[in-house]
Amino acid sequence: MKIAVIGGVAAGMSAASGARRHGKSAEITVLERGSAVSYGACGLPYYAEGRIADWRSLIVHTPETFQRERGVEVRTNAEVVELEHARRRLRLRDGGTASYDKLILCTGAALHPPPPEGVHTLHNPAGAAKLRQRLDDAAPGRAAIVGGGYIGIEAAEVLRARAWRVVIFEQRGDLLGREDSELTRRIGSHLTRCHVDVRLGQAAKSFEADRVNGEPFELVLLAGGLRPNTELAQQAGIALGRTGAIAVSDHMETSTGGIYAAGDCAETTDLVSGAPVWIPLGTTANKMGRVAGACAAGARERFPGVVGTTIARACGLGVAVTGLSPAQAKAHHFRPATVWIKAKDRASYFQGHPTEVQLTADKGTGRLLGASVMGYYGVEGRINTVAAALQARMSLEDFAQLDLAYAPPFSPVWDPLLVAAHQLRKLLH
Ligand SMILES: Cc1cc2nc3c(=O)[nH]c(=O)nc-3n(C[C@H](O)[C@H](O)[C@H](O)COP(=O)(O)OP(=O)(O)OC[C@H]3O[C@@H](n4cnc5c(N)ncnc54)[C@H](O)[C@@H]3O)c2cc1C
């Protein structure tokens, strides 16, 4: 059996590996239009900052190692321009063709519309390399970041570390796309203390290399406007979902039998609300890809969906979210009750710092709905605990009884999550 994968980053390489695991004798080919495969885009901000000397250390596999270790042919500079499913054939930009029995679309997401000339991005290694060069060559000045999602916030940290003054333009009234004014206020205050000027509700209506809305800047970086890359799918008549990404079953199969999709080009299910969502993340892309590959090779694996767990660092502060914000919960017809608490992240005599926890539960059913955690230590452990509870559809009552680890170097005896849970119980009873 021939399995072709289009796209060779997180989803594509995981799909090829998943297919190999279940299809020992399958002929598997990855077609990637770029010159590199299998790199961690998540590390690009830190490469641009100078923390990572060479972006190539973000590469996990080269085409050669993948061929040698997994028996998968990886073709770079191989852009697929047409998908003729009736003939199970792909047409490439260089005039060549490739055939398949099963196809996996891992085409990712793209900035749409593409940024004007001279506007920086962090979307791929070439963009990050240009930004790095600029930061190395130019004296620090004033920079504008367009977009207040997690990439914009990470970019602000990078630019501040290189002594640039930073303005973030965010067209929405909130940061991280969470529709959460309280979370936004808290992140915004922290960024302001770090000398980042956050302009909420200000769309960058026009921007170019050295100005945004007519205001001059020495550097402009686009960190928003990502859209699922669905051109090939649409051309082949594959259905998109409500979010505009490719609709897939939990076996990652599209509306066209024999064609699968995974990663940033595909939609998934929000396990808290049950609604379709598009949350493009590397962690999800890897898991979806693995399932798509396994299923294309004949296995029956499932990708159930996500709870939207995201973490980023904002000028040294860890900011993490999972599940629904109170406003999102309301929009999905829950009756959310929410608390914010501030507690020490570990014992005071072990350099404990304040950490802030937001916990949300449904007044009607007592079900846990979501959380945010902000702090300097233990943020990932705490948000992951809530993520696991959300995936298990845990009630607040059960969550408040969790047996969490304690020793002074790691946490206070009452973990901040439990402090928040006990506060929230009072609002539910
Ligand atoms: C700056 C930055 C920081 C990030 N940080 C994090 C993080 O901390 N945590 C996290 O979970 N996620 C993070 N992400 C997101 C993560 O990198 C993406 O979700 C992940 O790369 C998606 O993988 P993918 O394989 O679906 O798509 P992509 O990585 O976009 O790969 C798709 C590939 O398909 C190729 N392709 C597209 N069309 C064709 C075609 N027609 N023919 C051939 N090839 C084609 C493209 O060239 C591309 O290489 C970050 C992203 C960025 C940009």
Image: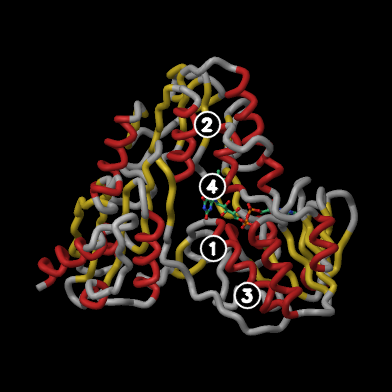
Among numbered discs 2 and 1, the one appearing first in the sequence: 2
In space, the residues marked 1 and 4 are separated at their CA atoms by 16 Å
User: What kind of element bears circle 2?
Assistant: strand
Disc 2 marks which residue?
221
In space, the residues marked 3 and 2 are separated at their CA atoms by 36 Å
In space, the residues marked 2 and 4 are separated at their CA atoms by 13 Å
Q: Which mark is residue 56?
A: none
Disc 1 marks which residue?
284
Q: Nearer the viewer, mark 2 or mark 1?
A: 1
Disc 3 marks which residue?
253
Q: Nearer the viewer, mark 1 or mark 3?
A: 1
* Mark 3 residue type: Glu
* Image: 52 above or below 103: above
Disc 4 marks which residue?
226
Relative placement, left or right, of 255 versus 213 is right
Between 190 and 410, which is closer to the camera in this rendering? 410
Relative placement, left or right, of 192 versus 71 is left
